[in-house]
Image (tube, rainbow, N blue to C red):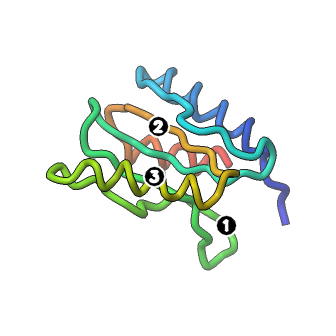
Amino acid sequence: MSQRLPAHLEVGAILRLAESQGGFATVLARGERDAGTILLVTTCRGKAARLYERMPNLDGSRSFVTTKEEDPEKQQDFSEYLARRRRQDADIWLIEVDIDVPERFVAQIDTLT
C-alpha cells in the first residue's frame, strides 16, 4: 500500500500545474494540512463549473470523478452545495481551477498521485 501525499503538497502541485498550463487556480478553503480531502472545482473561462472528488476504483487506486455540475439556470445551488460540504467537513480543501480543457487537466492530476 503506497503512502498518500500530504494534502498541502498535492494542492501546491495542482496550483502550479494550472499556472504552467496558462490557467488560474486558487484555494477557496484550506483543509487539514496532511490528510484533508481535496475537492476540485473546474471552470472554463468562468463557466460550466464541475466538482470533482477523488473516489476509490476497483483496483484500490483513487481518481477524481465528477460529483456535481453547475446548472447555468441555478448557479446559486452549486455555491450552496459547496458551502454545505464545507460546513459538514472542516478538513476539506476546496480548490478552484479555471483552465481551457478541464477534463484533460483532471486526468493529468490523477497521473501525478
Determine whether label 1 and label 3 are within 8 Å by CB: no
Q: Which numbered circle lies on residue 82?
A: 3
Q: Image quadrant of residue 89?
A: bottom right
Identify the mark nearer the N-term, 1 or 3. Answer: 1
Q: Which mark is residue 96?
A: 2
Q: Position of residue 79 (x, y in %)?
A: 37, 48
Q: Amino acid at mark 1?
A: Ser
92 displayed left or right of 95: right
**Residue 41: horizontal and vertical position, in percent?**
44, 45
Tell me which label, 2 or 1, sits earlier in the chain: 1
Classify mark 1: helix, strand or loop.
loop
* Residue for point 58% across, 67% down: 55
Q: For the N terminus, which image quadrant? A: bottom right
Element assignment for label 3: helix
Residue hosting label 1 = 61
The CA distance from mark 1 to mark 3 is 25 Å
Task: Count residues near mark 1 (Cα–Cα under 10 Å), then give few for <14, some for 14-19, many for 20+.
Answer: few
Residue that appears at 48% across and 49% down: 107
Q: Is residue 85 left or right of residue 61?
A: left
Mark 2 vs mark 1, CA separation in Å: 23 Å
Q: How far is disc 2 from disc 3 in space, using C-alphas?
A: 11 Å
Residue kind at label 2, given as amino acid type: Glu
Check the image and report above or below for 108 versus 66. Answer: above
Q: Residue at x 68, y 49 (%)?
A: 113
| Front label number (1 vs 3) | 3
Quarter occupied by residue 8: top right
Mark 2 or mark 3, which is nearer to you?
A: 3
The amino acid type found where label 3 is placed reads Leu
Lateral position of residue 37 relative to residue 84, left or right:
right
